[in-house]
Amino acid sequence: DLELCRMAVPRRVYTMSHIDYVVDRLGWLHDHRELVGGLEFYEEPPVLRFFTGKLRALGDWGTKLAAAFEADFGPHV
């Protein structure tokens, strides 16, 4: 099973250093992927639900992920 995510970047808006920063943070997130949990819709419109629906975290994985991020990068990133 292969799941893909497309990331679109506007032209002439970001520099290579911006892209390098995002790649670094995505690498960090991949290394800590066991901390990431699921999401569920709590408001799901009948049309365009992925664009206009509202999600909430299942459990407190967001707090654990934020604590790991702060431990690695500091509180003021």
Image (spheres, rainbow, N blue to C red):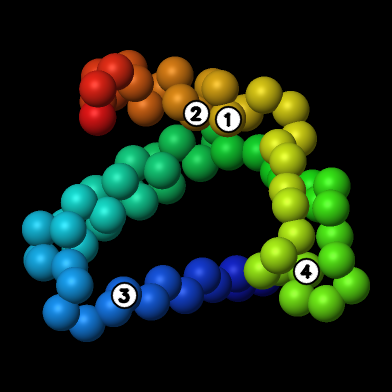
Q: Which mark is residue 49?
A: 4
Disc 1 versus disc 3: distance between alpha carbons?
26 Å
Q: Which residue is mark 2?
A: 65
- Which of these two is toward me, 21 or 56? 56
**In the displayed structure image, the side of residue 17 where residue 13 appears, left or right:** right
Disc 4 versus disc 2: distance between alpha carbons?
26 Å
Instruction: Name the N-terminal-most of marks 1 and 3.
Output: 3
Judged by depth in the image, the label closer to the viewer, 4 or 2, is 4
Q: Quadrant of the C terminus?
A: top left
**In the displayed structure image, the side of residue 29 where residue 50 appears, left or right:** right
**In the displayed structure image, the side of residue 72 where residue 41 appears, left or right:** right
Q: Is residue 5 above or below residue 73?
A: below
Give x and y (percent) for residue 5. Answer: 51, 70
Mark 4 Cα-neighbour bin, 10 Å: few <14, some 14–19, many ≥20: few
Question: Could you tell me if the residues under marks 2 and 1 are in contact, i.e. CB atoms within 8 Å?
Answer: yes
Q: Which residue is mark 1?
A: 62
Instruction: Name the N-terminal-most of marks 4 and 3.
Output: 3
Q: Is residue 41 above or below residue 37?
A: below
Label 4: state its secondary structure: helix
Residue sticking out furthest to the bottom? 11
Question: Could you tell me if the residues under marks 4 and 2 are in contact, i.e. CB atoms within 8 Å?
Answer: no
Instruction: Name the N-terminal-most of marks 1 and 4.
Output: 4
Residue at 49 percent of width and 28 percent of height:
65
Q: Which residue is mark 3?
A: 9
Judged by depth in the image, the label closer to the viewer, 1 or 4, is 4
Label 3: state its secondary structure: loop
Disc 2 versus disc 1: distance between alpha carbons?
5 Å
Indicate the quadrant where residue 3 lies. bottom right
Disc 1 versus disc 4: distance between alpha carbons?
22 Å
Q: Is residue 40 above or below residue 3?
A: above
Disc 4 versus disc 3: distance between alpha carbons?
23 Å
